[in-house]
């Protein structure tokens, strides 16, 4: 019996992100956007698929592009594999976007295009910062997180919802969660290295985040229960400062639990 030939390495998809934070920042705005647009319709679902494929294409392209930009010689077949899958995933993303725009109500198309351009602009700005080596600055992180959070109002626009304060509020709520996670994880790492001021900076950051969420609620951009979805992240930070996780694995499990709680509470609030 003839054995099947193994798939050539360069035809195999690149590995997916293994960091839980990357998946949370991709999925949470999509979940909140679909819930806020409930029932979302085919156009919003297709745009969610387009965002996932765009995320994958960027993840496939950046390692190869950064190696080439730095003048480093990549392993054999590395660039060819990355270029192939970047093209496949980018083509899939564009196809989903075109189908979503075609299925959207005519009145919803201008807002959908405007929201898409905002998302692409933020993502492009963050990519430039990656090549400049500034993506790990706090403002570089905020731009990247804002690009992902902007998917929430985008999905609402595709469902025919206006791009108003309520649409922006959902995206800002996702951004508030991302900022909380970033502030806590950075504080944990700095505290582990003996930086005594990291805890105070983390508390100050969470005070500002909580205030911002209260303002969103008072403006009626998000419902009260959606604002309450930030209680698990705030509790996680208070607990973590008092009882720090043993290691990065324990930290990751705590973050996963908080992400699920946040998305579940906020999603339920936005659907109702």
Image: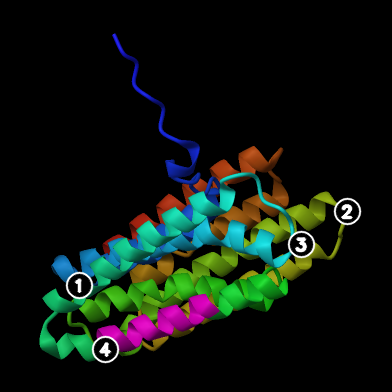
How crowded is the residue under tag 4: few (<14 C-alpha within 10 Å), some, or many (20+)? some
Q: What residue is shown with label 1? A: 100
From the top left corner, tell me how far across and down residue 67 is, in percent: 68, 59
Query: Which residue in the protein does label 3 denote?
Result: 199
Q: Is there CB contact under 8 Å for labels 1 and 2?
A: no
Tell me the mark number nearer the camera, choosing from 3 and 2: 2
Q: Earlier in the sequence, mark 4 or mark 3?
A: 4
On screen, 229 above or below 239? Answer: below
Of the image marks 4 and 1, the number of the one nearer the N terminus: 1
Residue at 71 percent across and 75 percent down: it is: 132
The crowding category of the residue bearing disc 1, from other C-alpha atoms within 10 Å (few below 14, some 14 to 19, many at least 20), is: many
Secondary structure of residue under mark 3: helix
- Asked if residue 7 lies in the magenta stretch, the reply is no
Q: Nearer the viewer, residue 241 or 43?
A: 43
Q: Position of residue 106 (x, y in %)?
A: 12, 87
Rounded to the nearest angstrom, the CA distance separating label 1 from label 2 is 50 Å
The Cα–Cα distance between marks 4 and 2, rounded to whole angstroms, is 48 Å
Q: Residue at point 43% right, 54% down?
A: 85
Q: Position of residue 28 (x, y in %)?
A: 40, 61
Q: Which mark is residue 194?
A: 2
Please state the total of marks drawn on the protein image. Answer: 4
Give the left or right position of residue 246, taking residue 231 as reference: right
What segment carries the magenta color? 111-124
Viewer-proximal residue among 42 and 31? 42
**What residue would you read off at disc 4?**
111
Q: Quadrant of the C terminus?
A: bottom left
């Amino acid at each position: 019996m003839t054995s099947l030939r193994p798939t050539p390495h360069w035809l195999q998809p690149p590995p997916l992100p293994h960091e839980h934070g990357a998946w949370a920042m991709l999925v949470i705005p999509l979940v909140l956007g679909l819930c806020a647009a409930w029932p979302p319709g085919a156009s919003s679902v297709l745009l969610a698929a387009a965002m996932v494929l765009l995320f994958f294409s960027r993840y496939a392209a950046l390692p190869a592009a950064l190696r080439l930009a730095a003048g480093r010689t990549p392993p054999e077949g590395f660039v060819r594999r990355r270029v192939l899958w970047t093209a496949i995933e980018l083509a899939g993303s564009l196809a989903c976007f075109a189908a979503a725009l075609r299925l959207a109500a005519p009145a919803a198309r201008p807002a959908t295009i405007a929201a898409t351009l905002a998302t692409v602009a933020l993502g492009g700005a963050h990519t430039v910062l990656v090549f400049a080596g500034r993506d790990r600055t706090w403002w570089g992180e905020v731009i990247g997180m804002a690009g992902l959070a902007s998917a929430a109002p985008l999905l609402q626009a595709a469902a025919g919802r206006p791009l108003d304060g309520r649409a922006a509020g959902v995206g800002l709520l996702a951004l508030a969660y991302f900022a909380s996670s970033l502030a806590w994880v950075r504080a944990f790492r700095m505290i582990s290295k003996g930086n005594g001021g990291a805890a105070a900076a983390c508390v100050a950051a969470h005070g500002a985040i909580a205030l911002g969420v209260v303002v969103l609620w008072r403006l009626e951009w998000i419902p009260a229960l959606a604002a309450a979805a930030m209680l698990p992240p705030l509790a996680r930070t208070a607990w973590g400062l008092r009882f720090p996780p043993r290691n990065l694995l324990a930290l990751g499990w705590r973050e996963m639990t908080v992400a699920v709680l946040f998305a579940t509470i906020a999603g339920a609030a936005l659907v109702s």
